[in-house]
Each structure stands twice: as structure tokens, then as C-alpha cells.
Amino acid sequence: MRAKPLDGIKVLDLSRLLPGALCTQHLADMGADVLKIEDPGLGDYSRWIKPLMKVHSGFFLTVSRNKRAMKLDLKKPEGKEIFSRLARDADVVFESFRPGVVDRLGIGYDDVCKINPRIVYCSLSGYGQDGPYRDRAGHDVNYCSYAGVTEQTGEWECGPALLNFQIADLTGGSLSSAMGILAALVDQQRTGKGRYVDVSMTDCTLAHAVITLARMGIDGTPRARGDDYLTGGIPSYGIYETADNRFVSLGALEPKFWNAFCAAIDRTDLADCGETWGDEGRAIRAQLETIFKSQPQDYWAKLGERVDCCLAPVLSLRESIDNEQIQARGMFVTDQHPTDGEVLQFAFPIKFSEFEFSIDRSAPLHGEHTEQVLTSLGYDDGEIKQMRGSGVI
């Protein structure tokens, strides 16, 4: 069988919580050997975020598969020496501390580059490694706020909406980091030289707010919340409530889809009104609200299956699990974890030729592979016992 795309790539993962964890899980799913390095105390505190399953949090178990884990106190000279030995043979170091922390520990990019010029060193942070906000704490909602994304969410008569999907953490953090790392690895393979990759979740979120920026390019100001192309400003794109208090999504932006939808509901008089703005657009939207309210969600779901007009039911995650398209794509898998039992997870979402996604390792226990890693570095049983006693591991 052909090797996985990232087979042979060694990643040292110093990150905590969601953005870094999901990034390195994607790398591990594609075949990279990801070693998660945690302090000997609590380690990555996402392990213990409540509610717990049996031992670990469902959060941790969902983003930690296919990795190894070791305990290592990087504040101790012996811990730093072990890290340096690992870094000599690594391809990637990934960290998500506040700017400057790894440099103070003596394991920053400049330190690692001296012993391994091929290293790809990725630092993920909320605001980047420089600028006046570099040392500020933050979470997804804050990064989205500074990027102008939060202000655009929600309906026009309400305040900004809170989302249960971390746009900055995942798009700005996990995926942007993976993109930067993979690009640097391609360059590393070509030139033999590594790179430093500085990923700001705020920057990378901002850089994807293309609809808002495009509007500003027209007259210098974005449209108000709930009044833009994709936020309810036009009738042909939106969320509508149904008779059974469920919802459907209509995305009939192109005339061919909008016209097909209008014909299906016997309202061909609206054929030229899909992109009507302002008060007239809101009046047409009100008519659609009444129409959608006349039938239950299932009725509209079947109409969307029958008519090619970009009409779909708004499903819960529970319903997505059973959806025939999601099932056909194999997007949910279960793993039997040694301490937590059966864990439902998302499968790796990208399909490659000659590649079969698999869970080769369950989410690791805290320090599960510490002895294995140290033995591979040449430490003997006595040295490992001494390091455990002194709190290095």
C-alpha cells in the first residue's frame, strides 16, 4: 500500500487547546509522526475540560488522535536538552504560547535553527509575533471582533451573534497554520532550508472577510449587519422558518436557481427580484417568510431534492450523522479509546487517491510515550528513572 502523504515527516507539537491541536491532528491523519510534548503537571489542560467522558474531555479526544505524547519540563536544563535532541531530527516544531515564551525557554526558532537549519518552525498566536497587541490574551470571539467579522454576524435588527463554530480558531488558526507548514515543507524539500511561520489568528480571519472588503471597495463602507449580500440583504439568500418551527436555507444566488425556485412555488412574478435590496427586498423576504411558514421542513427538503434551486434543510449535528450524503462520504467514525470507551469523531475530510484514512492511535494518555521516546534517543532505564524522580518527565 502506498505511504500516506506526510509519511516520514516528524512534528514536535508544543501547542495547547483547539487551534494547534486540530492543525497537528490534520498533519497526523495525513501520516506525520506528531509528538505532543506536555509539562509533567496537568499537561494540555484541554484534557480535563468538563464535561469529561470517563477520564478525558470529549473535546480533547476529538482533536488528539494519531499522535504520540510525552511529558517534559522545558524549564529544566535536562528537559531543554531532550527537546534539542528531538529537534535535531524533526521537520516541524509547532507552538502556540504567547510571543516570546519559547525564546525565554531557549527553544525558539533561532535556537532550533542553529542545530537544525531544515526546521519548519510555526508559531500560532492570537495577534501575531509583533504589533501592539502581540502580548494580549484572547479567544475566537475577540479575534473575530478585531477582524470585523463579529460586527457583520446576525440579523439587521439584532446585535452581533455568537457562533458555535470558531471561525478564527479553526480557519484563522488550524487551517492557516497547516497551509503555512505545508508550504514551508515543500520549500524545505526543494532547498534544504527551513522557515519561520508566524500565524496570527486575527490576520488570517481578516484576510478571509472577502465579501465585506469587496463591498468597501465600491463606496468605502461595508453594508450594515444583516443587510449584505450573504447576511439577509437579499431575498434569494437566507434562512427561513418553516411551519414546524424548523428552518431551511435558501442559496439561490444565480438567476437560474432563483427562477427555478420561483417556478416551484408558483411565484414567477418574483423572477426578477432575487437580488432586490432595501425596503423592497425586505418586503419580498417577508412574502417568502409567509410561504415557508405554510409547510413543514420536510416538505421544503423534498422540494429542494426535486428542484435544482439550492434549497436545503437546516440540520442538527445529530441529523447530519444520519444524512445520506454525509454517510456516503464516511464523515463520522468511532474509536475505542482505552480509558474512555467509544468516541465519536469526524473523519479526516480530504480525500486522496491511494489513501485510506484510519485511526492508528487513539488520543494519547498524558505522557504515554515518554519512555519510548527517551529510549529511542539513547537514554537507559536508570537515566529515565532519575529524570522521573527529579520531575523532568
Image (cartoon, helix red, strand yellow):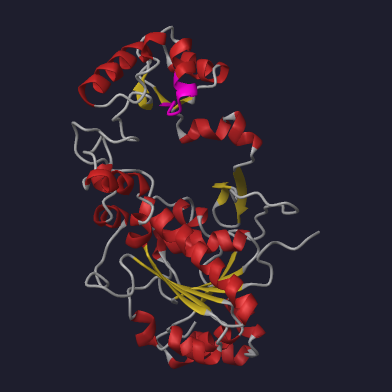
In the rendered image, residue 223 lying in the magenta stretch gets the answer: no
* Image-based side of 355 in relation to 387, left or right: right
180 or 78, which lies in front? Answer: 180
Q: Residue at x 45, y 89 (%)?
A: 111
Residue 192: image x %, image y %? 62, 82
The one nearer the camera, 133 or 192, is 192
Residue 384 in the image: x percent, y percent? 57, 87
> Residue 59 at x, y = what percent?
45, 53
Residue 82 in the image: above or below residue 228: below
- Dividing the picture into quadrants, the one containing residue 89 is bottom right
* Res. 390 in view: no
Question: For residue 251: magenta?
Answer: yes
Q: Quadrant of residue 189?
A: bottom right
Relative image position of residue 165 (x, y in whole percent): 39, 46
Query: Residue at the right extreme?
Result: 1
Name the one closer to the observer, 15 or 325: 325
Q: How many marks?
A: 0
Q: Residue at x 49, y 33 (%)?
A: 318
75 lies above or below 213: below
Q: Is residue 364 above or below residue 379?
A: above
Tell me what residue is drawn at x 26 percent, y 47 percent: 216
Q: Is residue 35 left or right of residue 177?
A: right
Residue furthest front in the image: 218
Magenta residue span: 250-258
Q: Is residue 209 above or below residue 372?
A: above
Query: Would you say residue 293 is visible in this rendering?
Result: yes
Viewport quadrant of the N terminus: bottom right
Q: Residue placed farthest to the top in the image?
A: 266
